[in-house]
Amino acid sequence: MNFEDLRKVIHLAHSQNIQASADALNLTPGALSKTLKKIEQSLNTDLFDRVGRNIQLNSQGEKFVSYAARLVHEYEQMCSEFSGGQARQVVNVTGPSVLLNHCLQTLISLLPEKNIALNIDASFEGQAVKRLVGGHAHIAIVTGEALSDAHLADLDSVLLGTTTFKVIAAGSHQLFSHHPEGKMTLKQLLAYPFVCPSSSPFCGIVRGIGSDGWPDQQFPRNIAFRTDDFSSLLSIVSQGQAIAYVPDFVITSSAFRAIELVDFQYHYREEYSLVYKPAMADGWLNRLVAKVQAQV
């Protein structure tokens, strides 16, 4: 058993799918299965339960992966210490795609230019926090809601910002022919069709009728389109087929315009943070956190 074997088991613990891990690790499923079997035989312990064609990490496996993650972390720290900064550092970042798309440019600009391999895993924030706790990710970008749900004392966070949701439309949308300044009443707005996610773009859970923070119970909308793919949602908006209620940082393209409601004061807000595990933080991560804190 070596450190590469440990990394393979850690990856398997995350995916719980031999084919998916084999593809990600550039191995054949047979070779990966053989490695897992070799490790289990050397330990005289099953780490995964076989469920049909799938595998599921069991309680012994959870203990093993916890030890393995710490060993790999210590090994990487040792290599970094004695390589004079020349060792290639793999950086695993996870979180909802809508937050990653917004924050990655800032993160990349703060990372060292050399010897960095950035792995980006878009996942809903519950899974992102789980990956962080399990040692499968170095950084998670999540909302304050995820942190309040987590109740995990061994995580630390840096507030990156607050987003206020706004109604947006394509600049070519027909509503601007009647309201060229983009100002209208709530009643006028609700005459137009919306595109909404089926579940929250942050946590993947159904939250209300539109799952985007709009108070549909009090002010029901005509929801003409639903999609959980945020790129598709923005595409529908950009084509002028519908309007949407989205985080304000989405309005970076001249293709979109924000709509101002003159008689509606409700604004849905979300805080979002960089989260990490101090006990598993290498020098590069501590330096990155210090740079982020200096910017916010």
Image: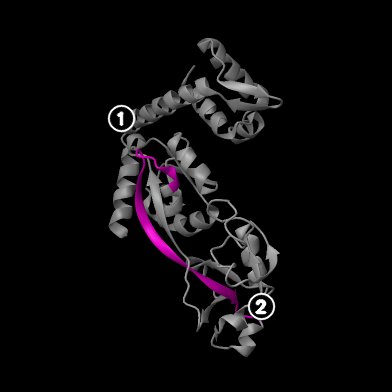
Q: Is residue 276 left or right of residue 243?
A: left
Q: Secondary structure at mark 1?
A: helix
Residue range of the region highlighted in magenta in the rendering: 149-173
Q: Looking at the picture, does residue 48 appear above or below residue 203?
A: above
Residue 192 badge? 2
Q: Position of residue 8 (x, y in %)?
A: 54, 27
Q: Position of residue 294 (x, y in %)?
A: 28, 56
Q: Amino acid at mark 1?
A: Phe
For the residue pair 234 and 112, the one nearer the viewer reads as: 234
Residue 258 is a magenta residue? no
Q: Residue at x 33, y 35 (%)?
A: 279
Q: Earlier in the sequence, mark 2 or mark 1?
A: 1
Q: Which residue is outermost to the front?
A: 218
Q: Main secondary structure of the magenta part?
A: strand
Q: Residue at x 34, y 37 (%)?
A: 282
Q: Which residue is mark 1?
A: 82
Whether residue 143 is visible here, answered yes or no, is no
Q: Quadrant of residue 235?
A: bottom right
Q: Looking at the picture, does residue 215 appear above or below residue 135?
A: below
Residue 155 is a magenta residue? yes
Q: Secondary structure at mark 2?
A: loop
Position of the C terminus by quadrant: bottom left
Q: Is residue 192 left or right of residue 68?
A: right
Q: Colour mode?
A: one colour
| Viewer-nearest of discs 2 and 1 | 2
Bin the neighbour count of mark 2 within 10 Å (Cα to Cα): few under 14, some 14-19, many 20 and up.
some
Q: Residue at x 63, y 26 (%)?
A: 55
Q: Amino acid at mark 2?
A: Tyr
